[in-house]
Amino acid sequence: MKVAVIGADGRLGRALVAALEEAPWTGPSGPVAWDRPDHDLDDAGAADRVLGRDRPDVVVHVAAWTDVDGCALDPALAMRRNATAVGELATACVERGVSMVLVSTNEVFAGDRAAAYAPGDPVGPANPYGASKLVGEEAARAAFAAVGAIGAEARDGPVAADGEPDSPLAGRVAGPQLAIVRTAWLFGSPGTDFPSRILVAADRALADGRPLRLVADEVGQPTYLPDLAEAITELLGAPVFGGTHHLTNRGAVSRAGWARETFALSGIAPEIEEVPLAAFDRPSRPPRHAVLAPTPLPGGEPMRDHEAAMADYAPALLRWLATTAGSR
Ligand SMILES: NC(=O)c1ccc[n+]([C@@H]2O[C@H](COP(=O)([O-])OP(=O)(O)OC[C@H]3O[C@@H](n4cnc5c(N)ncnc54)[C@H](OP(=O)(O)O)[C@@H]3O)[C@@H](O)[C@H]2O)c1
């Protein structure tokens, strides 16, 4: 199966290309990696051009404008990149019979309740980034629904594989499918993720002799890039992968709690002052508790706890911290 990844040079894109290279079903040449020169989100003709050129069977759309404050300052550009471009890609996929996996976000939910969100729960983004990602989901569903594709019907979770009890798919596994993969709080890219930024902030606070302010009332699910990449690869290896999937590592934690876990792994011990989200004045306000209820993977195994993933990541994180100490 020929798989193309859009946004292949981003954080998740790199992890996904690496995971797909290990999958035997991607063939000896592995996945096709598309980045900005191949597929510019500001170019309405880009999707049709690359699909015609490289002819994949499946496209995994990872690219997005992920600068949440930038999206808040220019919501029209956020819509162009995270919504309109997705609709154009979905339409081009449908026209060519190509399946699509769209990576989306927990920020399509308001995050104003204690219970975790199932795929079919009401959406209500709290900021322009989340709003643009939601419109992108809807544009993809509309394009795939027009041809009755698997996974386009509703936000009701993964579709059961043909042959399973209650499968609605008898005789329907051929044809393009749409999978929407919502995830959250990605880490595993030393230098650009939350654990890296909080370690640098802790270093500065220690040097300045002041407490480090940490947000206590924003809760999410730290998710390790290689784990998510493997989960998406597992999904794609199944005959039926359409539907809306919630894929995160297990365990919800506040920003302050995640920072403490990071400090425990690194041996850095700043003085901590817990503050509310409102203490930081930013153009974009994240949802407070947009926690995703996980959906099953084809193999039946849940993704592991984020603490175990953090422990695996710690050596690379600490190496990065040590090698950049002089340049910060
Ligand atoms: N990071 C998170 O915590 C998080 C949480 C939930 C969901 N997600 C979703 O997961 C996906 C991957 O996120 P990530 O953190 O890996 O993102 P990332 O590192 O910011 O990578 C984004 C990719 O999109 C490309 N891109 C951005 N603007 C573009 C444009 N105008 N034209 C063409 N390409 C463009 C980037 O290319 P350049 O390198 O050329 O800019 C990059 O390859 C996104 O869909 C995001 O919405 C992320």
Image (tube, helix red, strand yellow):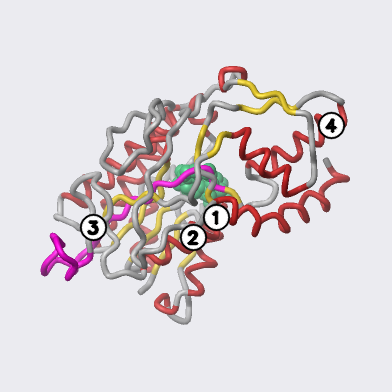
* Residue with the mark numbered 3: 159
In the image, residue 169 lies in the stretch drawn in magenta: yes
Marks 3 and 2: CB-CB under 8 Å? no
From the top left corner, tell me how far across and down residue 85 is, in percent: 37, 44
Magenta span of residues: 161-186
Cβ(mark 1) to ligand 1 < 8 Å?
Answer: yes
How far apart in space, not on screen, are marks 1 and 2 (Cα)?
6 Å
Marks 1 and 3, the one that precedes in the sequence: 3
Eye-nearest disc, 4 or 1: 4
Depth check: give the residue in front, 9 or 308. Answer: 308
Q: Secondary structure at mark 4?
A: helix
Q: Is residue 14 left or right of residue 154?
A: right
Residue plotted at (18% across, 48% down)? 153
Amino acid carrying mark 3 in the image: Val
Amino acid carrying mark 1 in the image: Leu
Marks 2 and 4, the one that precedes in the sequence: 4
Depth check: give the residue in front, 263 or 50. Answer: 263
Marks 4 and 1, the one that precedes in the sequence: 4
* Residue with the mark numbered 1: 225
* Residue with the mark numbered 2: 229
Residue plotted at (73% across, 58% down)? 315
From the top left corner, tell me how far across and down residue 146 is, in percent: 15, 50
Quadrant where the C terminus is found in the figure: top right
How far apart in space, not on screen, are marks 3 and 4 (Cα)?
50 Å
Marks 3 and 2, the one that precedes in the sequence: 3
Eye-nearest disc, 2 or 4: 4
Q: Secondary structure at mark 1?
A: helix
Marks 1 and 2: CB-CB under 8 Å? yes
* Residue with the mark numbered 4: 206
Q: Give the class, few, some or many, for how many residues have Cα within 10 Å of label 2's Cα (few <14, many ≥20).
A: many
Depth check: give the residue in front, 131 or 171. Answer: 171
Amino acid carrying mark 4 in the image: Leu
